[in-house]
Image (cartoon, rainbow, N blue to C red):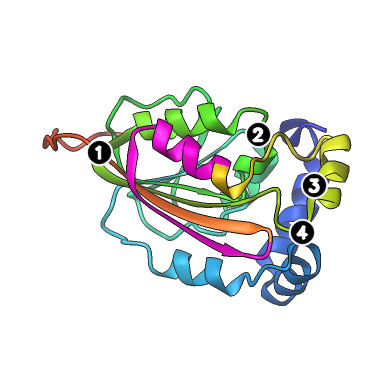
Amino acid sequence: MNWKTAPLLATLYDVAVQNRALSRLGARALWNYDITHLHKAIAAHDMSALTLDIPCGGGLAIRNNPRHVAADLSPTMLKRARRKTTTLVQADIYNLPFPTSTFDVCLTYNGLHCLQDPQTALHELTRVLRVGGTLQGTTIVKGAGRDPLIKLLQHQGAFGNPGTRADLRTWLEEAALTNITLTSSGAVTAFTARKSGTHHSPASAKVD
């Protein structure tokens, strides 16, 4: 199953995620995850930061803010995200159409586990992140009590190659990210990390 070419599944998934009560019950039942952690993280975002949100899905993390760039591979998800005012871009997370060192913050919520190569995706997100910028997200991980469900979803094509919590830390470190924080709830691990290096002050980037 390809999320880009499965509009019905993408729509059903987004409806469930956008419904607070349904998403809370589903996250707990499927992944033993307290989704209030995600909602608190989204609410705490710095509205002044130039932010890339990928995959944005139907716009759970989107705020009415011209400095929030929402990207997704799925046209269905972008159509649903269009309900909220922001800059929308159809983009492949492995080959982002942005210059190096563009964004202050990169967000990637609930997407890495759907990818065949999450490590490469993290390297690409780090590329478009400014030195000193923050990468933040969540992902389902193996080794946290839900491996049979992960294997089932892999067999159905809904999941790619999620790693363990230890794999996630290694991938972040190998992307030259520092100040790594991992916080687990059930089979979901939230992460934040910072792009290291000497800080430069490029002119404000324009995103078309």
**Label 3–label 2 contact, CB within 8 A:** no
Q: Mark 2 points at which residue?
A: 115
Identify the residue at image location x=53%, y=25%.
94
Q: Give coordinates of residue 8: x percent, y percent.
A: 83, 45
Assign a secondary structure to mark 3. helix
| Neighbourhood count class around disc 3 (C-alpha, 10 Å): few under 14, some 14–19, many 20 upward | many
Q: Give coordinates of residue 121: x percent, y percent.
A: 52, 31
Q: What residue type is labelled 4?
A: Gly
Q: Name the residue under label 4.
A: 145
Separation of residues labelled 3 and 2 (CA atoms): 13 Å
Q: Which amino acid does label 1 sit on?
A: Ser
Magenta stretch: give its range: 167-186
- Is residue 13 at all visible to an observer of this figure? yes
Q: Residue 150 carries which label?
A: 3
Of pointers 3 and 4, the one earlier in the residue sequence:
4
Of pointers 2 and 1, the one earlier in the residue sequence:
2
Of pointers 2 and 4, the one earlier in the residue sequence:
2
